[in-house]
Image: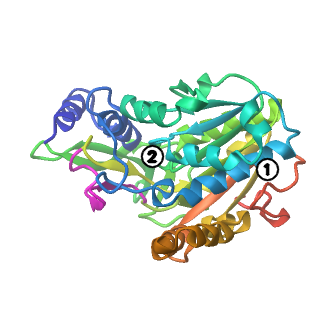
Amino acid sequence: MTTLAGRIAGRIREEGPITVAAYMAAALQDPEDGYYRRGDPLGRGGDFVTAPEISQMFGEMIGLWCVDGWLADGAPDPFQLVELGPGRGTLMADALRAAAIRPAFRAALRLHLVESSPGLRARQAALLADARPTWHESVAGLPPGPRCTVANEFLDALPIHQFVHTAHGWRERGVGLDGDGNLAFVDSLPAPPDLPPDLPIGSMVERRPAAEAIVRDLARAIAACGGRAVLIDYGHGAGHGDTLQAVRGHERVPVLEAPGEADLSAHVAFADLAAAARAGGAAPWGPVPQGRFLQSLGILARAERLAAARPAARATLAAALHRLIGAGAMGTLFKVFAITRHGAPPPAGFTDADRGAAA
């Protein structure tokens, strides 16, 4: 049992079973032993690889998306360029390099990073020093003003609540202790009254109020001050089914096995995000498949230019491109969701048919 598992078990012995959301929060963000407080989980030597680490092309496309949106919003000066969960800073470094095609964009932006990990903040500071970033613990700390917000694989790690339809009605899944004192799931906590009554026994519903609150805050800021947001993650329409998983060393492991030593995540329910954006007074777009989105921004042409400049790397570039846009790879597994002001034209990568499609 890890040190953190022992402390969680002690809390359960004193207070009773805790929610899955509380378990996730402790496992990922505990100040002493939480997964994201311990170091750098990214890359081949870590536990997972994100799209920006696969190829520079991903961040470059995001940078072009931000420039296009800034122009569509009237080129405000100054404006905030915000990234939620910037990792090593790779995406933002690539985005800023691509955005150099419009010097006025670079001059007008004020870079803000929402990051809780001291280790990752240090990596970001080294890579993004020229942009003079300002860091925040949460979205709530961002100053008012027009902003373009980017988030890649950020929402999936926010805590979820799981609700199970049992023979005795809906119950919230919690984490308790088995007969040997080990962490174990229990379906015994009280559930809210607004869960769907028509789902069969054994069904599960997942909700992520922290993500909905963030999207609502982003939407309110966009409605009040202008700007837009693009959120990229894996997920589905409605939050039905058990999607909670733990990953360590690029392999799935039991969720309760070693809190603090494995990444925990769950699919994003985009329909809930669309509802939150509307509640915040803004317009949701999508989600659309990542592959379609990146191709509409010009990633195929960018890949060809890179291959022409680096012939020896052509095979590596092709493999990276397939991972980013291929069917059965990130191209279909990952989705792209955007927020704009009501009445705005479709943001780059979206069409009129994608307006509020998550509803």
Q: Which residue is disc 2 drawn over? A: 157
Q: Residue at x 64, y 58 (%)?
A: 336
Task: Give coordinates of residue 174: x percent, y percent.
Answer: 34, 44
Residue 302 falls left or right of residue 157: right
Disc marking residue 68: 1
Kindly indicate whether the residue at mark 2 contacts the one at mark 1 (C-beta within 8 angstroms): no
Is residue 248 part of the magenta span, yes or no? yes
Q: Residues in magenta?
A: 243-258
As displayed, is residue 278 above or below residue 348?
above
As displayed, is residue 15 above or below residue 292?
above
Q: Nearer the viewer, residue 115 or 94?
A: 94
Q: Nearer the viewer, mark 1 or mark 2?
A: 1
The amino acid type of the residue labelled 1 equals Asp
Q: Quadrant of residue 346?
A: bottom right
Q: Quadrant of residue 140?
A: top right
Residue 27 falls left or right of residue 331: left
Which element carries disc 2, helix, strand or loop?
helix
Q: Residues within 10 Å of mark 2 (few under 14, many from 20)?
A: some
Which element carries disc 1, helix, strand or loop?
helix
